[in-house]
Image: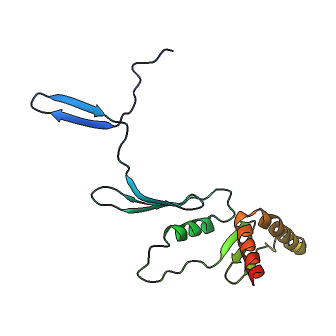
Amino acid sequence: MVTDSKKKIRVRGTGCFDPSDNSFGFTPFNEAPSSQQNVKTCAGGGKRWVTTGSDPSKMITLKSKESSADQYADFVSQFKALTKDLKPKKPQQLPDSLRVVNEQGLECWLDEEKTEMTFTGKIDLSRHSRDWQAEVLKQVQLIVRRLPASERFNKVINSIKNRSLEK
């Protein structure tokens, strides 16, 4: 195996310059102290941590799949999970319901507290003035196809079912 001795590689370490004799020394090391402390993660890929240094900061990252039916709901649920131990100075209003479908002019919302599902649809009547009934049927079929494929919808429905069985 032949290696290129001129290939540049990055190495962590400490460099010291001595101005008395214009010499430079470098001490490499493999492990550096972590720049993140008190790391907390949640379902969905969200993460919260405190930075190290002279002026520490709290940091949050949220993650959502591009294919998610409702990325906003993914972010909100992760935010709630990562900040449940933080108390706001004044109450903040977050959405009560979760949007589980959002495509082709159709939105479906679940409210777990009220055990209600609401869906809304938009149809351009100038394009579909004669076949508006067929368009409504297409949207209802879209809801019926999309909801069982939504992991969030299934979790909420199962939670509602389990609560009604316990009663």
**Residue under the point 80% across and 69% down:** 143
Q: Residue furthest front?
A: 166
Q: How is the image coloured?
A: rainbow
Q: Quadrant of residue 80?
A: bottom right
Whether residue 155 is visible: yes
Whether residue 119 is visible: no
Q: Quadrant of residue 14?
A: top left
Q: Find residue 64 and report its horizontal and vertical position in percent.
A: 60, 59
Q: Nearer the viewer, residue 65 or 142?
A: 65
Q: Find residue 121 and report its horizontal and vertical position in percent.
A: 77, 74
**Residue under the point 66% across and 66% down:** 70
Query: Considering the image in quadrants, where does the C terminus appear?
Result: bottom right
**Residue under the point 85% across and 68% down:** 141
Q: Quadrant of residue 78?
A: bottom right
Q: Taking 167 as reference, is 68 above or below it? A: above
**144 displayed left or right of 71:** right
Q: Nearer the viewer, residue 126 or 110?
A: 110
Q: How many marks?
A: 0
Q: Residue furthest left?
A: 20
**21 displayed left or right of 134:** left
Q: Find residue 125 and report its horizontal and vertical position in percent.
A: 81, 74
Q: Find residue 90 and report its horizontal and vertical position in percent.
A: 43, 83
